[in-house]
Image (spheres, rainbow, N blue to C red):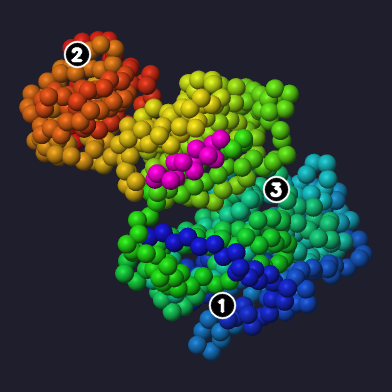
């Protein structure tokens, strides 16, 4: 079950006044899992009321110079914590915060930049004493960064680099780093990251919550902190980053309850908001996937909590059921197009008047470019950059982000213009970013040009979408036949055996030649039903020979029902001839045939190789 919702009007509840009573109202349950989640995700959560949206903690260290020390005290004001720890008993429902046994801080000085380990020795209320080897200096720096590696910058002692030695950035074990600087051995730690909090509930089981920025923001990774800054912030260094947080959970029993989920986030601006994906099971055991998009612009600051509206899963599912028409077929096709002069937009209008499809238009990020200026100088420059380094993301021009999930569709028709015999650079960017998502999907191609041939565009498409099941040859619409585009599209769709609300062809069998196995997607008719029943008895091997320069063919050794019609067979088509002969096409021919299906995912040149075009006595095996 897929639920998609855009919460454009949902209020973004920033923590302008995050009251203690609000935290208590949304406490986790008392399971060990939730204790672990809080310990992992919350780091330094402000726990008291505030008069603004920023918790700034001023150093309370003494001003006199300390030449050496083997112990340091770490104290906190009411709004500073190392982590959150739940004390939920029958008599005490409050949230309490403690240093914990085994805690370690790293300390160095302005004159000795070698990090020294200090272990928790004693604890009185919220004041901890850490002891370790002697460190000398006039100013002391400290960092608390569990599960993370710290290195002092060799040029600036006040800068600490923090990384995770190749570990993945998930919320399972990520603690928020905090740092301190003092002229004495009394340390006051400051938070370096912010928190995004969401509340989810009214559901049987929550298995995963994923957060991502709507503009591709990097949420975490390796980076650095300048300890001496008044407003300390963790900053990414670009060496190890993540653009989404996958929150793997196993929380059950929330039919009438809600639970808080925390995400530690690098301080930054989210220009287009964020998206949350929640997956799990409802009370009937059905899988669900809810997408909630918050598109309001907001800023995450160090030491603040940005809160979002609670997600009531039961209500979300109910709303979907009420708005869906059970008698209305969902569009199973997505038309993806880019249009610069408007010709491709006209083609898409003609196409969607004949089929039921959703439409996605690709737009360049820079809409001021005149690609045709100076004989398409800018367009040529973009194409040359891609050609020089086709595997480098920086070679492709930026496009506007898109939010449509390709997983919701089986069929795709891509419509694009030709630039100097190549695929338009803007569409190349989209397919470079999303081509892998089209693997094993049915994909058709329509190309618009003035007069140039489209073979290079087809090559570009096969490079960018290498594992697609191509639906026949690409349709070429040019200046001389653009006015007749509706008829051209209608005829093209008929050659694909395209069905409006389902996969173009249903059911698959295998075909093997010289140890190379491909799949054939079958059409639905009496012949294919009889063929599948025959293959249930075991594989069928036949010997085929070349005919003309368009097919290999031969006897099946048995007969199948026929429903002959005049068919313009195309490369990849699998045809029944005279009831007992099978024809595999690598070219085209028009005759009275019964269609069986189409070989998946091979271009015209790949088909010639696979079918051993021009050879005889070819052993071909069909199997389930």
Task: Give 511 or 8, whichever is nearer the viewer.
Answer: 8
Q: Does the segment drawn in magenta span residue 345?
A: yes
Q: In the orientation shown, which residue stands out farthest toward the left?
A: 558
Q: Which residue is mark 1?
A: 26
**Precedes in sequence: disc 1 or disc 3:** 1
Q: In the orientation shown, which residue stands out farthest toward the right?
A: 64
Spatial CA span between label 1 and label 2:
73 Å
The percent coordinates of residue 216 (x first, y second) are 62, 49
The percent coordinates of residue 432 (x first, y second) are 54, 35
- The span shown in magenta is 343-355
Q: Main secondary structure of the magenta part?
A: helix
> Badge 2, how many Cα within 10 Å: few under 14, some, many 20+?
some
Q: Which residue is mark 3?
A: 236
Task: Give 249 or 510, whichever is nearer the viewer.
Answer: 510
Residue 584: tell me if it is visible.
Answer: yes
Spatial CA span between label 1 and label 3:
31 Å
Q: Which residue is mark 2?
A: 545
Nearer the observer: mark 1 or 2; the answer is: 2
The percent coordinates of residue 565 (x first, y second) are 20, 31
Q: Report if the CB atoms under discs 3 and 2 are less than 8 Å apart.
A: no
Left or right: 362 as drawn, with respect to 205: right
Disc 2 on helix, strand or loop? Answer: strand
Q: Quadrant of the C terminus?
A: top left
């Amino acid at each position: 079950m897929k639920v998609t919702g855009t919460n454009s009007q949902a209020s973004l509840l920033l923590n302008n006044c995050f009251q203690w009573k609000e935290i208590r109202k949304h406490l986790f349950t008392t399971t060990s899992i939730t204790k672990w989640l809080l310990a992992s995700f919350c780091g330094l959560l402000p726990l008291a009321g505030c008069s603004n949206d920023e918790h700034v903690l001023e150093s309370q260290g003494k001003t006199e110079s300390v030449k050496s020390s083997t112990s340091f005290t770490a104290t906190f004001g009411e709004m500073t914590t190392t982590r959150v720890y739940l004390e939920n008993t029958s008599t005490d429902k409050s949230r309490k915060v403690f240093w914990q046994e085994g805690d370690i801080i790293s300390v160095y000085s302005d004159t000795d930049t070698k990090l020294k380990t200090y272990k928790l020795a004693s604890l009185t209320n919220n004041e901890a004493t850490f002891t370790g080897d002697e460190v000398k200096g006039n100013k002391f720096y400290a960092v608390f960064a569990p599960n993370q590696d710290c290195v002092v910058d060799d040029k600036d002692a006040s800068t600490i680099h923090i990384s995770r030695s190749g570990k993945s950035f998930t919320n399972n074990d990520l603690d928020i780093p905090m740092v301190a600087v003092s002229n004495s051995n009394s340390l006051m730690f400051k938070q370096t990251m912010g928190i995004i909090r969401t509340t989810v509930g009214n559901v049987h089981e929550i298995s995963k919550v994923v957060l991502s920025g709507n503009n591709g923001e990097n949420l975490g990774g390796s980076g650095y902190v300048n300890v001496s800054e008044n407003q300390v912030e963790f900053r990414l260094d670009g060496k190890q980053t993540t653009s989404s947080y996958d929150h793997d959970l196993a929380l059950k029993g929330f039919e009438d309850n809600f639970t808080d989920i925390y995400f530690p986030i690098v301080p930054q601006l989210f220009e287009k908001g964020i998206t949350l994906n929640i997956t799990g099971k409802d009370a009937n055991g059905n899988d669900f996937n809810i997408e909630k998009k918050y598109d309001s612009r907001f800023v995450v600051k160090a030491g603040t909590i940005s809160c979002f509206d609670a997600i009531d899963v039961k209500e979300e599912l109910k709303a979907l059921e009420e708005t869906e028409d059970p008698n209305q077929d969902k569009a199973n096709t997505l038309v993806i197009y880019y249009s610069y002069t408007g010709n491709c937009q006209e083609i898409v209008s003609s196409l969607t008047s004949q089929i039921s499809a959703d439409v996605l238009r690709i737009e360049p990020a820079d809409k001021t470019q005149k690609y045709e200026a100076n004989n398409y100088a800018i367009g040529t420059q973009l194409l040359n950059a891609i050609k020089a380094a086709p595997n480098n993301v920086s070679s492709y021009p930026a496009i506007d982000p898109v939010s449509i999930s390709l997983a919701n569709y089986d069929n795709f028709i891509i419509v694009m213009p030709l630039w100097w015999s190549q695929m338009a650079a803007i569409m190349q960017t989209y397919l470079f970013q999303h081509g892998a998502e089209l693997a094993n999907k049915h994909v058709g191609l329509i190309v618009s040009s003035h007069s140039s041939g489209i073979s290079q565009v087809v090559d570009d498409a096969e490079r960018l979408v290498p594992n697609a099941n191509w639906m026949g040859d690409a349709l070429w619409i040019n200046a001389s036949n653009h006015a007749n585009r509706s008829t051209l599209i209608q005829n093209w769709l008929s050659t694909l055996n395209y069905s409006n609300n389902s996969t173009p062809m249903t059911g698959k069998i295998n075909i093997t030649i010289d140890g190379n196995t491909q799949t054939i997607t079958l059409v639905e008719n009496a012949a294919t039903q009889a063929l599948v029943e025959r293959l249930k008895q075991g594989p069928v091997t036949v010997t085929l020979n070349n005919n003309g320069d368009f097919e290999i063919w031969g006897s099946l050794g048995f007969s199948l029902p026929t429903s002959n019609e005049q068919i313009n067979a195309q490369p990849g088509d699998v045809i029944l001839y005279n009831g007992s002969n099978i024809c595999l096409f690598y070219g085209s021919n028009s005759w009275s045939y019964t269609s069986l299906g189409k070989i998946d995912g091979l271009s015209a040149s790949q088909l010639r190789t696979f079918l051993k075009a021009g050879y005889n006595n070819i052993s071909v095996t069909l199997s389930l």
